[in-house]
Amino acid sequence: MAGQRESFTVAIIGGGIGGLFAALSLHHHCAALGITINVYEQTSEYKEIGAGVGIGINAAQLIHKLGLGEAANKIAGDRNGVWLAFRRSDNGAEIVTVPVND
């Protein structure tokens, strides 16, 4: 039929922050197209691996566009005047903070 699109499936390889944001973005912006999104991750469970997560300005803008800004702000805390902050993952306690002016 003319003008009718076939549905299709998108495979995202990797369930890390990049893969999950790719899936959320597709879902957020393309939900009306009927796209099926499958995320494939090799590990069977998420657990602490000692890695940090850095969120730059572009990623922060994407987080807000996807409607996750308020939730991210609750986790990240107040970042006014902060260039870099390290926090514990289990309780959110600050380990070290580097101010913007340093």
Image (tube, helix red, strand yellow):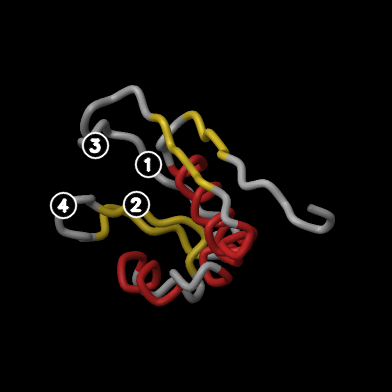
Q: Tell me the residue at 60%/65% (across/down).
A: 32
Mark 3 or mark 4, whichever is nearer to me: 3
Mark 2 or mark 3, whichever is nearer to me: 3
Mark 2 or mark 1, whichever is nearer to me: 1
Q: What residue type is labelled 3?
A: Tyr
Give neighbour class at mark 1: few <14, some 14-19, many 20+ (Cα, 10 Å): few
**Real-space Cα distance between discs 1 and 4?**
13 Å
The image position of residue 91, as x and y in percent, is: 15, 58
**Real-space Cα distance between discs 3 and 4?**
14 Å
| Residue pointed to by mark 1 | 52
Which element is circle 1 on? loop
**Real-space Cα distance between discs 2 and 1?**
8 Å
Residue 46, label in figure? 3
| Residue 47 shown left or right of residue 69 in the figure | left
The image position of residue 67, as x and y in percent, is: 48, 73
Do the numbered discs 1 and 3 sit on residues whose CB atoms are within 8 Å? Answer: no
Q: Which amino acid does label 2 sit on?
A: Phe
The image position of residue 41, as x and y in percent, is: 37, 29
Q: Tell me the residue at 26%/59% (across/down).
A: 94
